[in-house]
Structure formats: structure tokens, C-alpha cells
Image (tube, rainbow, N blue to C red):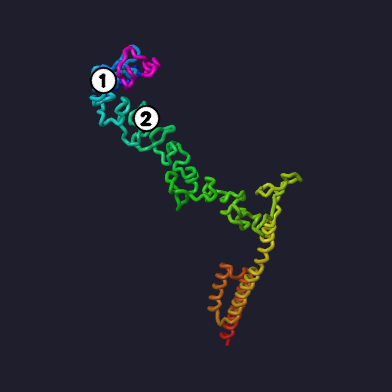
């Protein structure tokens, strides 16, 4: 294989040079002798009657004339080894027999290990840059993996699986429990507005111009491009952005964080956050206050009805726990401890009186 290939390359180069220099087609080459040829030239001398004209001064073997003008079973010798192509078991002379040669008419290439249609051998327009990995890429690298079939090899393709979302954004959309594979078209993060940015990292999922955080705060659907904070009420547009001045561009319905928003939605947000929520919290404050006060009064009653010091010790531990868990206020705890001390003093005085008696 190696010994014959350089010879084939030299011969091929010579033939190409001759053909290019002559710049003569079979139709342009006149016949020095008239005859019955039908394949390369029409009506020229064909000694062996195989349809291919005999070479002459106007038309040589290199141009397409019969390489074996006296042998009707042969007309060409691609590798120039003196053996006609019809009987040559290695037509291109690359050292690989025709039946094993994927490209039997090309002396530079002959095998394709990965079966992708590109040759294992180098220095050819069909040479495979990834000879052991099936692929159909043609841009930058030939014959390498190309999952989405856009001819760009996966290693250079911004969207290797062709799902419309770039590789780095698929990785960015992945989390600890959900992983997206940029090389698998069936593993694609959700993209509601089809802007190629996955919803989980998209600031505006419905592409209506309103940031999702604003829509969530106002109560409009972040996945519905037709619904915005401006049309939440009465089914019509109830707001505008004012950027200053009195020109035709001073007012706009498009979201603009730098402009003044005049709308029912903005007004309702102010009312709800500044007035409604504080008012709703007032009953909660009173409920907590009365709950703590009730627990304080109940514990004070237990202290006053205690029958001995042991019971007071248990009550004091319970009071400490209540203060720690914020079930009663700190100053309530101090008052209850003072009440315990008073009761202990009373029990101590009663015990002294019994001993004197």
C-alpha cells in the first residue's frame, strides 16, 4: 500500500496538469482519422470497437482516449500500472483491493472506520477529523459528532442539541435535583416565551416587557403575555408611564422603571402595603397581647393559691420557661417572681410561728 501510493499521486498530478493545460473537451477535439467511436469522441477512429477513440495528436490518453486501443475489453488505466481497470483488482493503486476499498477510484483514501462517509486517511477533502467517532459535521471539523445536524461539530456548536437554548443556559438552568443535558434534545428546560432563555433564569417569562418580580407583586400572570398590571382591572388599560415634559413621547404604556407610573395597579399596591396590611395586623397585635395577659393572670392565681414552697419552686421553673419561649413578657415574669418571693416569705413566717409554739 505505502510503496505504490507516492507513484499514484505523482501520476495523478501529472494527468491533472496536462488536462488543465490543454483545456480541450472531447467535443472540441477533432478527429485525425474518422471512425465509429461513441464514448469519448463521436466518429473518430476506434480500432478495437469498444466505443472509445484511439489516441491521436488532438486527443491523448490523459484527456480520455482509449489507453488500450487494441484491446476491446479495456479502455482505462487509472493507476498507470499497465493493467486495465476492468481487470485490475486495485484500480487506484493504493494497495487496497477494490472490494475492500470504499473509494476504489481514489488512490489517496480507502477506509472509513466509523462509517460516517469520511475517510480515515488525511490530506483529502473527505478526510475525517474524528476517524473513530461517527459524525456528519462539515464546518471547522469534518466527520465529527453533530447531534443537531447543522454541520457544526458539537464542540464548537453554541446549541449542540439544536433545541433553541444555548449550552451554557441549559447548564445555568440546572439545579441540584434537575439537570439539563445540552447534548440531548429531549432534555430541554421550559421556555414559555421562546426567547431562548429558560424560565428559571428569565426575568420576563412571558416577554410582555414587565419584570416577573413586578408582575408577581402586582398579581398579574408571569406566564401570560396578554396580562399585565395595567389591564388587571376592568379588562382595559388603566395605567401609563410618564417620562416628563409634554411631548408625544412623554407617555407610554410600555414598562419603564425610570419613569413615573400612574396607574390603578400602582395605587392599589400603595394602599395595600401601606394601609391594609398594617390595619390587618392590629387584631393580631391585640390577640397576642391578651393571650400573654391571660397567661400572666393564670400563673399569678396559681402562685397565690400555692400551699407550700415545693409548689412555688415548680411554678418558678414554669415561669422561666414561659419567659424564654416568649409566651409572657419579661416584665410579667419579674412580677410573678416577686409574687413567689412574697409567698415564700409568708410560708417562712408561718413555719417560724409553729416552731415558737
Which residue is rendered at x = 67% and y = 56% of the image?
Answer: 236
19 drawn magenta: yes
State whether residue 10 appears in this view: no
Check disc 2 and report its element: helix, strand or loop: loop
Q: Residue furthest right?
A: 246
Which residue is rendered at x = 46% and y = 43% of the image?
Answer: 162
Residue 47 appears left or right of 262: left
Residue 303 appears left or right of 102: right
Q: Quadrant of the C terminus?
A: bottom right
Q: Earlier in the sequence, mark 1 or mark 2?
A: 1
Which residue is rendered at x = 66% and y = 68% of the image?
Answer: 282
Is 60 above or below relative to 210?
A: above
Secondary structure, magenta segment, majority class = loop
Residue 277 found in image quarter: bottom right
Q: Quadrant of the N terminus?
A: top left
Check disc 1 and report its element: helix, strand or loop: loop
Instruction: Locate residue 315, reporting x and y percent.
Output: 55, 75
Pointer 1 residue: 49
Which residue is rendered at x = 37% and y = 27% of the image?
Answer: 124
Instruction: Locate residue 289, reporting x and y percent.
Output: 64, 71
Residue numbers of the magenta segment: 16-43
State whether residue 43 appears in this view: yes
Instruction: Locate residue 110, reporting x and y percent.
Output: 30, 29
Amino acid at each position: 500500500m505505502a510503496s505504490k501510493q507516492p507513484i499514484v499521486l505523482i501520476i495523478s498530478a501529472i494527468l491533472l496538469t496536462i488536462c488543465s493545460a490543454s483545456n480541450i473537451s472531447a467535443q472540441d477535439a477533432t478527429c485525425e482519422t474518422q471512425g465509429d467511436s461513441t464514448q469519448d469522441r463521436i466518429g473518430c477512429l476506434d480500432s478495437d470497437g469498444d466505443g472509445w477513440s484511439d489516441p491521436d495528436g488532438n486527443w491523448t490518453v490523459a484527456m480520455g482516449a482509449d489507453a488500450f486501443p487494441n484491446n476491446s475489453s479495456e479502455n482505462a488505466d487509472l493507476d498507470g500500472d499497465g493493467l486495465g481497470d476492468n481487470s485490475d483488482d486495485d484500480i487506484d493503486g493504493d494497495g487496497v483491493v477494490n472490494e475492500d476499498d470504499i473509494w476504489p477510484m481514489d488512490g489517496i483514501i480507502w477506509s472509513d472506520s466509523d462509517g460516517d462517509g469520511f475517510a480515515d486517511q488525511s490530506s483529502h477533502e473527505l478526510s475525517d477529523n474524528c476517524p473513530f467517532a461517527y459524525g456528519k459535521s462539515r464546518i471547522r471539523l469534518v466527520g465529527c459528532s453533530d447531534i443537531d445536524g447543522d454541520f457544526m461539530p458539537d464542540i464548537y456548536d453554541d446549541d449542540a442539541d439544536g433545541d433553541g437554548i444555548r449550552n451554557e443556559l441549559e447548564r445555568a438552568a440546572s439545579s441540584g435535583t434537575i439537570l439539563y443535558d445540552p447534548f440531548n434534545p429531549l432534555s430541554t428546560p421550559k421556555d414559555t416565551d421562546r426567547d431562548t432563555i429558560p424560565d428559571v433564569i428569565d426575568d420576563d417569562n412571558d416577554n410582555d416587557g414587565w419584570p416577573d418580580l413586578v408582575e408577581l407583586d402586582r398579581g398579574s400572570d408571569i406566564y401570560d403575555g396578554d396580562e399585565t398590571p395595567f389591564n388587571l382591572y376592568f379588562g382595559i388599560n388603566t395605567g401609563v408611564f410618564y417620562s416628563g415634559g409634554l411631548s408625544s413621547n412623554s407617555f407610554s404604556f410600555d414598562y419603564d422603571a425610570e419613569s413615573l407610573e400612574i396607574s390603578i395597579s400602582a395605587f392599589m399596591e400603595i394602599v395595600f402595603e401601606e394601609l391594609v396590611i398594617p390595619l390587618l395586623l392590629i387584631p393580631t397585635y391585640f390577640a397576642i397581647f391578651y393571650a400573654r395577659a391571660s397567661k400572666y393572670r393564670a400563673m399569678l392565681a396559681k402562685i397565690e393559691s400555692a400551699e407550700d414552697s415545693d409548689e412555688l419552686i415548680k411554678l418558678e421553673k414554669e415561669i422561666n420557661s414561659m419567659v424564654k419561649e416568649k409566651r409572657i413578657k419579661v416584665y410579667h415574669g419579674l412580677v410573678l417572681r416577686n409574687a413567689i418571693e412574697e409567698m415564700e416569705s409568708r410560708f417562712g413566717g408561718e413555719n417560724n410561728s409553729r416552731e415558737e409554739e
